[in-house]
Image (cartoon, rainbow, N blue to C red):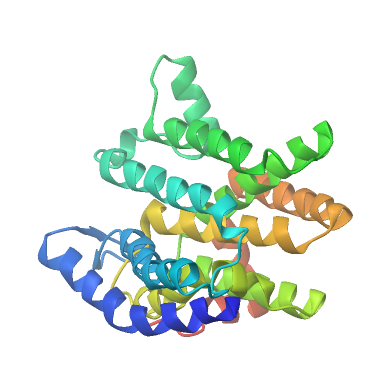
Amino acid sequence: MYWVGFPLALVISLWLVPAGARGLRDAGLVRENYRGATLAFPLGAVLATAALVALAPLAFLNDRADLDLLDPELRRWLPYLLGIAFLGFLDDALGQGAKAATPRGWRGHWRALRAGTLSTGAIKAIGALALAAYVISGRGLEDWRYLADVALLILATNLFNLLDLRPGRAEKGLALLAVGLCLGAWTFAPFELLGIFAGPVLIGAWLTLRERAMLGDTGSNLVGAIAGVWLLTVLGGDGRLIALAIVAALTVYGELRSISTTIESVPPLRWLDSLGRA
């Protein structure tokens, strides 16, 4: 009954996520998006909270009523999901005070480190590496496969951060990945494992697409972490290496070129990217 977490999280999020977005706005936690609209920010903090609210009854019933409501593997991946959301929140809260002076991308953070400045983005990268190395340990992998899986998890997380430059883009990427993995492997395992996180992201997408809230690094990191864990848990060894090559290539492209410009220049991608947007 691992699938129960996904519909429960959906039901909880239908109330909690819009209410949380209103709470952010009422508290003055807002930011301008690419069009200059002022939106509630960061919605990712609300999404992580909704996942924990859904986890509470499931954890209690799973243990006290001896029900199989939570995938045992969730224990392994939960520290990464929550830790990466916290690191994103740190970047949202402290790293955007002066946008012009804030390093962007891995090259920008590396240049800042060489100049003796430890940016919040660099802290996020170091923290993500530590978390990934921890959660992937103990799986009995060979050295090179262990390093490859760590790289896949980190790069997938970062890739969705690069994608989150337009409303709903990161969430659409996660949805496409979910469909591909579920149909390709003919399994519902991604939602059985991380349904408590996927549910809030799905409801939150309605708010981001309607330009009522922004994910922030908190949310885009969380979405990327979900994607990375899905790739690691659904794909076999060769499949993970192929995924690593694709994710690495997209990451390099995103660091060197504009993903938004590329999407705008390809009609099918432009249509998909604008689908559902206000």
At x 43% / y 36%, what residue is drawn?
A: 121
The percent position of residue 88, horizontal first and vertical second, equals 40, 47
Taking depth in this image into account, of 250 and 26 the one nearest to the observer is 26
Is residue 168 visible in the rendered image? The answer is no
Q: Residue at 55% across / 33% down in the picture?
A: 130
Instruction: Judge whether residue 249 can be spotted in this image.
Output: yes
**Height in image: 221 above or below 123?**
below
Rendered location of residue 264, percent (x, y):
57, 69
Screen quadrant of the C terminus: bottom left
Number of on-image labels:
0
Q: Quadrant of residue 75?
A: bottom right
Compared across the picture, whether 197 is left or right of 227 comes to left
Q: Position of residue 87 (x, y in %)?
A: 40, 42
Write the residue at 35% across / 35% down.
102
Q: Using the image, determine if residue 184 lies above or below residue 122.
A: below
Q: Quadrant of the N terminus?
A: bottom right
Q: Residue at x 35, y 42 (%)?
A: 91
Please, is residue 12 above or below residue 70 in the view? below
| Picture quadrant of residue 233 | bottom right
Q: Is residue 31 left or right of residue 199?
A: left
Q: Residue furthest right?
A: 238
Residue placed most toward the observer, 216 or 37: 216
Percent from the top left, x then y, of residue 26?
Answer: 11, 67
